[in-house]
C-alpha cells in the first residue's frame, strides 16, 4: 500500500475513460482494469469510483447498460460514447504534453540551464 | 429553449429519483458482491469476505450522496427532503417553534406597517400621469409668499415651468337639496386639472378660460369617492345645482377614480375654482398680497431641459423680486422645490417616518439576535443528532442546508403571520380619521409590501440561521457521540454572549425611546393650558356654511352668544374665531413691529404671532 501513489485531482476521470476504452466493463471491473494497466501503482478508494462514473455518464462521455458479469451476477456495464472517445484522445494528448514538460523541468541539471 | 430543456430534465430526474436510487443501491451492492467473490477465492469464508468487501468499499451513504450530486438535478429533491425533515423537527420542538414564529411575526409585522406608511407618504408619487416631473414650491410656516397675487406673478413670469397650478383647502356646507352637511374641498386654480394632465371620468373639468374675476365660475367637480358615497354613482349628477355655503354651484364633472387631490394626507370631496373663494368662507383673500394662507401649494411640470436646480433658482429670483417690489407685504427666503403632496410637512414627515423605520429595523435586529441565540441553543440540543448524521456520512453542507431550511421555514411562517397583522392594521389606518373630516393616511397594502415582508423574512432567516453554523462546522462527531449528550457545543464560546449583549443594547434603546415618547405624550395630555379645561364645553359653528358673510357675521355671533347664555347651567360664554390643531386653517398671522420702527416693511417685522379673534367673554372664562 505504501508505494501506491495518490491520484492527482481530475485524473480519475481520465483513468476511467482509458480503462473502458479497452472494452465495456462494470464498476468493479474498471477498478481491476486500472490496477492492471497501472501496475497496481495507484491508490483508488473503491466507492470514490462511482461519483466519477455518474459524472461521466451525465456528461455524455460514457453510456451505461445492465447486463450479466463473468461471475454470473447482474451488473451495470459502462462503454465509451463517441464523445468519450474524442475526449480520451484530447485528454491523453494534453496529459502527455504536461507530463513531458514536468519531467523535463525536473530533470534539468544546473549546467544545462 | 435551453432553459426549458433543463427544466424538463430536472423534473424528469426528480420523478425518476426513486428508481435511480434503487439502481444505485443495486450497482453498489453488485460491486461489493464481485469484490467478495474475489476475496472468497483467496480462501476467506463468505461472510468474512462480504464484511471485508463492505469495509474496503468505504462510506456507502456518503458515496451515494456524492453520486446524486454528480447527477445534478437534485436540488428539488433534496430541498423537499430538507423541508419535510425540518417540519418534522419543528413539530417536535413545538415551544421553540411557536416562540420563534411569534417573535418574528411581531418584528416583521412592525416593519411592514412602517414600510406601508413610508410607502404611502414618502415613496409613492401622486396618482397622476408623469408624477415624477411634477415639482412644487415649498410653502413653509415662516413668512412666505404663497398669496394669490404672488402666485399669479410667479405663474406668469417664471421661465421654468410649463404652467403652474395652485390650490387651497376649503371647509364648507354642501346642500344637495335634502341634507346639508359639512364637506371638504380644494379651491383650485382654473388650470389645476390641465397641469395635472388628468381627464374626468364623467362630465368635464373647469379650465383657465372659465375664470373671469371673483365669483365668476360657480362650478363644482366631485371626487370619485364622494360621488360614490354622497351621490350613489348617479350619472345624472352632471348639470345639477347644489348649494355650497348657500351659494348655487353647478356640478360639471367627476374626477377619475384613484385621484384624491394633490395632498397625500388629506383627500377632498370636491374641487371648485379658486376665483369663487369668497363664497366658500374665508373672505376675499385673492387680492391680499400679504395673505399667506390663500395658497396651500403651487406646482407644475418642468419645461423639457430645465433642471430642478435651475427652476429653484428661477423661483427664488422671482421671490426676491417680489419682496423688493412689495416690501410691506412680501418677504422671501430662499427655498428649494420638492415633490408635491406633503407641502411644508414634507421634511418633518420624512424625518418622522425615517425615525420610525429605524426603530422598526432595530426591533427586527433585536429579535434576530434573540432568535439567533435561541437557534444556537436549539442546534446544541441536537448535537447528538448532528453528530450521528455526520458519522453516517452526511456532509456538513447538507446539515447546514437543513438548518437553514428550518430557519427559512420559521421566518416565512413568522413573515406571513406578521404580514397578515400588518395588512389588517394598515387597512384600519387608511380609514382612520383622527381629527375629523379631512385627514387620512394614504396607505394601502400592495405587492411592494409583500415583497418587502418576504425579503425581511429571508434576511432575518439568514441573520439568525448563521449563528449555529460555526458550531456545526467545528463539531467532531466522534467526540460528541463518545461524550454523550451532556457535552454541548459552544459552551465556552462567546458568540451567544455577544448576541445577548447586542440584544440587551438594542432593547435598551427601544425601551428608552418608547418611554420618552410615552412620557412626552402623557405630559402634553396633562399640559397646563393656563385655564381649567374641565367643565368647559366647546360648540363648533361654521357661519359661512350657513351663508353668513361680511357684515352679517358679527350680529349672528352676538345672537349665538346671547342664546347660549340663556341655556340653564351655562355660566359664561366666550367666542374665538378658530382653534388648533389645524393651525393652517385656523389663524392668521399678524405683523408686529418695534415701537421705533418707521419703515413697516416685512424686513423689519419683529415677531409674527398667530392672531385669534375673540369675544369679550373669552378671556375671563374661569371655572367657579
Image (spheres, coloured by chain):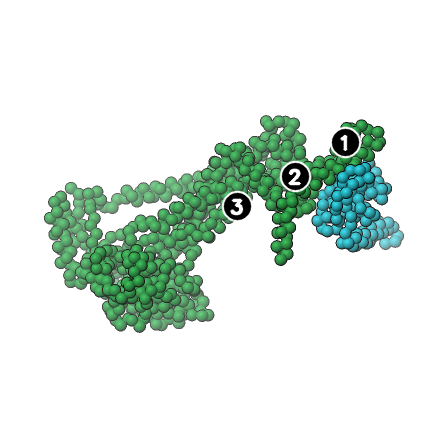
The dot on residue B503 is none
Q: Nearer the viewer, mark 1 or mark 2?
A: 1
Q: Rate crowding at label 3 as few (under 14), some (14 to 19) or many (20 or more) other CA atoms within 10 Å.
A: some
In primary-sequence order, the first of circles 3 and 1 is: 1
Q: Tell me the chain of label 2.
A: B
Q: Tell me the chain of label 1.
A: B
For label 3, the SS is: helix
For label 2, the SS is: loop
Disc 3 target residue: B458
Image quadrant holding the C terminus of chain B, namely: top left
Disc 1 target residue: B50
Q: Quick check: B462 left or right of B29?
A: left
Q: Is residue B481 above or below residue B336?
A: above
Q: Tell me the chain of label 3.
A: B
Choose between B21 and B145: the one closer to the eye: B21
Residue B91 location in percent, x, y?
A: 52, 34
Q: What hue represents chain A?
A: cyan
Disc 2 target residue: B395
Q: Gap between marks 3 and 1, in whole Å?
A: 49 Å
In primary-sequence order, the first of circles 1 and 2 is: 1
For label 1, the SS is: helix
Residues tagged 3 and 1 counted as in contact (Cβ below 8 A): no
Q: Is residue B235 visible?
A: yes
Amino acid at each position: 500500500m505504501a508505494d501506491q501513489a495518490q491520484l492527482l485531482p481530475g485524473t480519475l476521470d481520465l483513468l476511467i475513460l482509458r480503462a473502458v476504452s479497452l472494452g465495456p466493463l462494470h464498476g468493479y471491473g474498471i477498478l481491476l482494469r486500472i490496477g492492471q494497466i497501472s501496475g497496481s501503482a495507484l491508490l483508488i478508494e473503491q466507492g470514490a469510483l462511482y461519483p466519477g462514473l455518474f459524472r461521466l455518464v451525465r456528461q455524455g462521455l460514457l453510456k451505461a447498460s445492465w447486463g450479466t458479469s463473468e461471475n454470473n451476477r447482474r451488473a451495470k456495464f459502462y462503454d465509451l460514447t463517441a464523445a468519450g472517445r474524442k475526449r480520451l484522445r484530447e485528454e491523453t494528448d494534453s496529459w502527455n504534453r504536461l507530463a513531458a514538460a514536468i519531467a523535463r523541468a525536473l530533470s534539468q541539471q544546473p549546467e544545462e540551464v | 429553449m435551453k432553459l426549458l430543456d433543463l427544466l424538463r430534465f430536472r423534473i424528469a430526474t426528480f420523478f425518476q429519483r426513486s428508481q435511480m436510487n434503487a439502481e444505485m443501491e443495486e450497482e453498489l451492492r453488485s460491486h461489493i458482491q464481485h469484490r467478495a467473490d474475489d476475496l472468497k477465492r483467496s480462501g476467506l469464508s463468505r461472510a468474512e469476505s462480504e464484511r471485508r468487501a463492505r469495509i474496503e468499499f468505504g462510506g456507502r451513504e456518503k458515496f451515494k450522496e456524492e453520486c446524486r450530486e454528480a447527477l445534478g438535478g437534485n436540488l428539488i429533491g433534496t430541498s423537499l427532503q430538507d423541508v419535510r425533515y425540518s417540519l418534522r423537527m419543528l413539530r417536535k420542538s413545538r415551544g421553540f417553534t411557536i416562540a420563534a414564529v411569534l417573535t418574528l411575526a411581531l418584528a416583521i409585522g412592525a416593519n411592514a406597517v412602517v414600510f406601508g406608511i413610508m410607502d404611502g407618504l414618502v415613496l409613492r408619487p401622486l396618482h397622476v400621469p408623469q408624477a415624477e416631473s411634477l415639482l412644487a414650491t415649498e410653502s413653509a410656516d415662516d413668512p412666505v409668499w404663497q398669496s394669490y397675487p404672488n402666485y399669479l406673478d410667479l405663474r406668469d413670469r417664471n421661465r421654468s415651468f410649463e404652467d403652474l397650478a395652485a390650490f387651497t383647502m376649503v371647509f364648507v356646507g354642501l346642500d344637495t337639496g335634502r341634507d346639508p352637511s359639512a364637506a371638504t374641498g380644494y379651491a383650485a386654480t382654473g388650470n389645476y386639472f390641465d397641469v395635472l394632465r388628468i381627464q374626468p371620468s364623467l362630465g368635464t373639468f373647469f379650465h383657465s378660460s372659465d375664470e373671469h374675476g371673483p365669483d365668476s365660475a360657480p362650478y363644482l367637480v366631485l371626487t370619485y369617492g364622494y360621488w360614490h358615497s354622497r351621490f350613489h354613482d348617479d350619472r345624472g349628477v352632471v348639470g345639477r345645482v347644489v348649494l355650497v355655503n348657500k351659494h348655487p354651484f353647478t356640478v360639471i364633472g367627476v374626477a377619475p377614480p384613484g385621484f384624491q387631490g394633490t395632498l397625500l394626507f388629506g383627500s377632498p370631496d370636491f374641487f371648485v375654482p379658486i376665483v369663487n373663494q369668497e363664497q366658500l368662507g374665508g373672505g376675499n383673500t385673492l387680492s391680499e398680497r400679504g395673505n399667506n394662507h390663500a395658497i396651500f401649494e403651487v406646482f407644475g411640470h418642468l419645461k423639457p431641459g430645465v433642471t430642478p436646480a435651475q427652476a429653484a433658482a428661477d423661483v427664488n429670483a422671482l421671490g426676491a423680486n417680489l419682496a423688493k417690489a412689495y416690501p410691506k407685504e412680501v418677504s422671501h427666503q430662499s427655498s428649494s422645490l420638492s415633490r408635491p403632496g406633503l407641502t411644508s410637512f414634507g421634511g418633518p414627515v420624512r424625518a418622522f417616518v425615517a425615525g420610525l423605520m429605524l426603530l422598526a429595523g432595530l426591533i427586527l435586529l433585536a429579535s434576530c439576535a434573540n432568535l439567533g441565540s435561541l437557534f444556537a441553543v436549539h442546534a446544541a440540543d441536537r448535537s447528538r443528532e448532528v453528530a450521528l448524521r455526520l458519522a453516517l456520512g452526511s456532509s456538513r453542507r447538507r446539515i447546514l442546508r437543513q438548518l437553514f431550511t428550518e430557519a427559512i421555514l420559521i421566518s416565512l411562517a413568522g413573515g406571513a403571520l406578521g404580514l397578515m397583522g400588518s395588512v389588517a392594521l394598515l387597512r384600519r389606518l387608511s380609514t382612520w380619521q383622527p381629527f375629523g373630516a379631512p385627514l387620512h393616511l394614504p396607505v394601502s397594502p400592495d405587492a411592494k409590501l409583500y415583497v418587502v415582508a418576504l425579503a425581511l423574512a429571508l434576511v432575518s432567516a439568514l441573520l439568525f440561521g448563521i449563528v449555529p453554523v460555526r458550531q456545526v462546522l467545528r463539531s467532531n462527531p466522534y467526540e460528541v457521540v463518545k461524550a454523550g449528550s451532556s457535552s454541548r457545543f459552544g459552551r465556552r464560546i462567546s458568540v451567544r454572549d455577544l448576541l445577548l449583549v447586542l440584544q440587551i443594547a438594542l432593547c435598551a434603546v427601544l425601551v428608552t425611546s418608547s418611554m420618552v415618547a410615552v412620557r412626552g405624550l402623557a405630559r402634553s395630555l396633562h399640559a397646563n393650558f393656563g385655564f381649567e379645561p374641565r367643565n368647559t364645553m366647546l360648540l363648533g359653528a361654521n357661519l359661512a356654511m350657513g351663508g353668513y358673510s361680511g357684515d352679517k357675521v358679527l350680529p349672528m355671533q352676538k345672537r349665538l352668544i346671547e342664546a347660549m347664555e340663556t341655556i340653564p347651567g351655562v355660566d359664561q360664554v366666550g367666542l374665538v374665531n378658530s382653534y388648533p390643531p389645524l393651525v393652517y386653517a385656523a389663524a392668521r398671522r399678524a405683523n408686529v413691529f418695534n415701537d421705533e420702527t418707521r419703515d413697516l416693511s416685512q424686513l423689519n417685522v419683529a415677531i409674527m404671532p398667530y392672531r385669534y379673534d375673540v369675544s369679550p367673554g373669552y378671556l375671563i372664562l374661569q371655572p367657579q
